[in-house]
Amino acid sequence: MEFEPSAARGAALDQQMRERLADTLDYMFSELGGPLSIDSADAARLIADIRRSRQPANLFAIYYEMVLSLEDEDLDRARELVSEMLNQPRVGGTIVKTVEQRGPADLSRLRRFLMTDLDMATEPSPQLFDATQRRIEQALDLLDRGFPDMAAEIRALLSEIVIAEGPEDPKALTFDGASSYMMWGAMLINGRGQNNVLDTAQALAHESGHNLLFGFCSSGSLVENDDDELFSSPLRKDPRPMDGVFHATYVVARMHLTVSHLLDAGVLDEHEREAALADLGAHRRNFDVGDQVIRDGGRLTPLGAEVIESARAYMASAVQPA
């Protein structure tokens, strides 16, 4: 399995995720179309559209909420969600918006599927939103110039970037970003979480890396450890399930890859280069910590072993620039 990014891989994973959703809905509507009050022609149009074109992350979240409603035998709520699914807007590319630009139902899904403690992710001030949006654009431009394959894969994987504002208190529990399998294609970013364009470029590589892993494991898990088995993680203070450690370790290698390419491409100024070299050292240490946890306690599936070996091979070959 290749560790280097590619737009083709990102597009293929997006197609794969949409095909799986379409197949599931096709079966669900054929079995429950009557109780869900969905017309067969409407169902066919929705499924065809999902197969044909990129979908908003919210569509995936609505599906998972509908499954939970059916498990609770709440048909009225399931019917509402079918109607909402039929009326979802299409997406043409990566879009950026704030938390509060989403409706109440969307916010509820963010809280349920993306960030349980959404209270720490509040509406950013107009100034912070504008500054973060500019920094995201500048980060993608930097990647276009220094690591175009990463920039292309990020755009292929992410359909939506939601900007929030984390706590101002430096001692408070906070976040840099968040992603979820149940909101395929979306990432939440803390406008306070990065101080410069280089940091934001790494944040985009990081969170799109989580989406990449979600795509890889769409047909099976990466680890066999139970979620109640907790381990230390290279990027979190609190103990995490092995799946979380695996994700963190993999995306650390992806950030290392990104910084290395930017350094090699000569697109960083002197100050950015100094920061990038320090980041490389931190990423190396964090990867080694996480990888040792995986080696010691991880029970990997064949897929998980293949994925982490690609990251290990890259890190083993990576040379610290002078």
Image (tube, grey):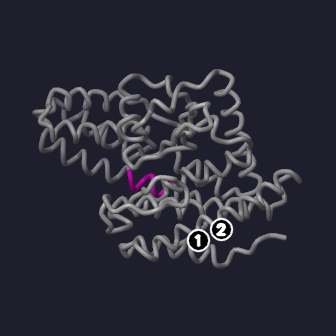
Residue 50 is tagged as none
Q: Which residue is mark 2?
A: 284
Q: Position of residue 112 (x, y in %)?
A: 35, 37
Q: CA separation, marks 2 and 1?
A: 6 Å
Q: Helix, strand, or loop for circle 1?
A: helix
- The residue most toward the right is 270
Discs 2, 1 touching: Cβ within 8 Å: yes
| Residue 248 located left or right of residue 58 | right
Q: Residue 5, can we see it?
A: no
> Which residue is at 26% across, 40% downward?
44
Magenta-tinted stretch = 11-17
> Which residue is at 52% across, 53% downward?
236
Give the number of marks: 2
Q: Residue type at mark 2: give it.
A: Arg
Q: Nearer the viewer, residue 260 or 21?
A: 260
Q: Position of residue 113 (x, y in %)?
A: 37, 41
Residue 224 among those drawn in magenta: no
> Which residue is at 16% across, 26% downward?
76
Q: Residue type at mark 1: give it.
A: Asp
Residue 288 is tagged as 1
| Residue 253 located left or right of residue 46 | right
